[in-house]
């Protein structure tokens, strides 16, 4: 296995199995046949549980397959559990390049996803979130629990502070996003956030709408390159 030092966190464009020391970003393995990421990558935040309604699982599967069909890469939390595992498995089966990012201490708890295009093992949750941010051109939030809320609020806060201007898309499957939107609205009404907070993210009603929006965003991104 080739050993490469990359302190800046850059990735090799190699179609082979690679182990890389990405200090301070953790240890990185690249595997599988899809060794090169697509020009547009989508980071997915979602639950490590499947949810109470089968439509959540179906939505995650449709998103993964849709990203692959659109020629986009998927970046996710690296676990083979819940909606996280569903969206990654669906994308892989459809031929997408899928990168998983997981802290070392969660590799057993979240059951590391086998056979990914790339797996990055980090030294902490904070480093994981930094890599999820860095590798995504856009963020899509599927239904999830406390971890999903944590990731979403942090990426929104970074945007509010001017650290990035990447799109953040909440998927309103079965009305899941409505309480989130209501919380932001209430926070603004009570004077704890500016009205501009509502513009930090957007809400799409279903998976086809999300995929159409991502296609439009990629077109805009490609024109700017």
Image (cartoon, rainbow, N blue to C red):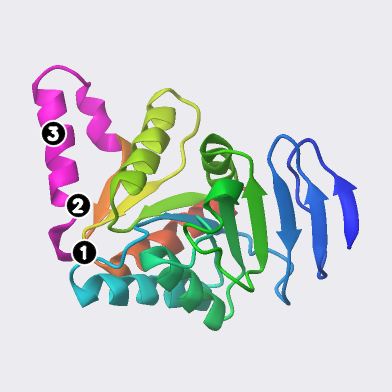
Answer with left or right where residue 36 lies relative to residue 184.
right
Coordinates of residue 122 in the picture (x, y in percent) = 63, 44
Tell me the SS state at disc 3.
helix
* Residue closer to the observer: 214 or 104: 104
Q: How crowded is mark 1: few (under 14 residues within 10 Å), some or many (20 or more)?
A: some
Span colored in magenta: 174-199
**Residue at 30% across / 73% down in the picture?**
57
Proximity of marks 2 and 1: CB atoms separated by less than 8 Å: yes
In magenta stretch: residue 197: yes
* Residue closer to the observer: 150 or 64: 150
Tell me the quarter of the image containing the N terminus: bottom right
Residue farthest to the bottom, as pictured: 93
Q: How crowded is mark 3: few (under 14 residues within 10 Å), some or many (20 or more)?
A: some
Looking at marks 3 and 1 on the same chain, the residue that comes earlier in the sequence is marked by: 1
Proximity of marks 2 and 3: CB atoms separated by less than 8 Å: no
Coordinates of residue 114 in the picture (x, y in percent) = 60, 72
Q: Residues within 10 Å of mark 2 (few under 14, many from 20)?
A: some
- Is 174 situated above or below 32? above
Tell me the SS state at disc 2.
loop
Numbered circles on residues, count: 3
Coordinates of residue 175 in the picture (x, y in percent) = 14, 59
Looking at marks 2 and 3 on the same chain, the residue that comes earlier in the sequence is marked by: 2
Q: Mark 3 points at which residue?
A: 185
Q: Real-space Cα distance between discs 2 and 1?
A: 7 Å
Tell me the SS state at disc 1.
helix
Q: Real-space Cα distance between discs 3 and 1?
A: 19 Å
**Residue at 15% across / 36% down in the picture?**
183
Proximity of marks 3 and 1: CB atoms separated by less than 8 Å: no
Q: Mark 2 points at which residue?
A: 177
Q: Name the residue under label 1.
A: 173
């Amino acid at each position: 296995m080739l050993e490469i030092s990359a302190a800046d966190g850059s990735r090799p464009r190699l179609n082979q199995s690679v182990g890389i020391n990405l200090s301070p970003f953790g240890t990185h393995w690249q595997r599988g046949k899809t060794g090169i990421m697509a020009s547009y990558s989508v980071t997915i935040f979602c639950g490590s549980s499947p949810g109470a309604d089968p439509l959540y699982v179906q939505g995650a599967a449709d998103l993964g397959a849709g990203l692959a069909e659109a020629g986009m890469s998927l970046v996710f939390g690296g676990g083979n559990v819940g909606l996280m595992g569903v969206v990654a498995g669906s994308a892989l089966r459809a031929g997408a390049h899928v990168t998983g990012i997981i802290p070392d201490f969660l590799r057993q708890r979240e059951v590391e996803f086998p056979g990914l295009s790339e797996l990055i093992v980090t030294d902490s949750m904070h480093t994981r979130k930094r890599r999820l941010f860095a590798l995504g051109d856009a963020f899509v939030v599927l239904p999830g629990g406390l971890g999903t809320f944590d990731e979403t609020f942090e990426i929104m806060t970074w945007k509010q502070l001017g650290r990035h201007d990447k799109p953040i898309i909440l998927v309103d499957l079965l009305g899941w996003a409505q309480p989130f939107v209501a919380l932001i609205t209430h926070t603004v009404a009570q004077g704890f956030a500016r009205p501009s907070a509502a513009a930090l993210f957007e809400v799409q009603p279903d998976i086809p709408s999300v995929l159409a929006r991502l296609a439009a965003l990629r077109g805009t991104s490609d024109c700017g390159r």
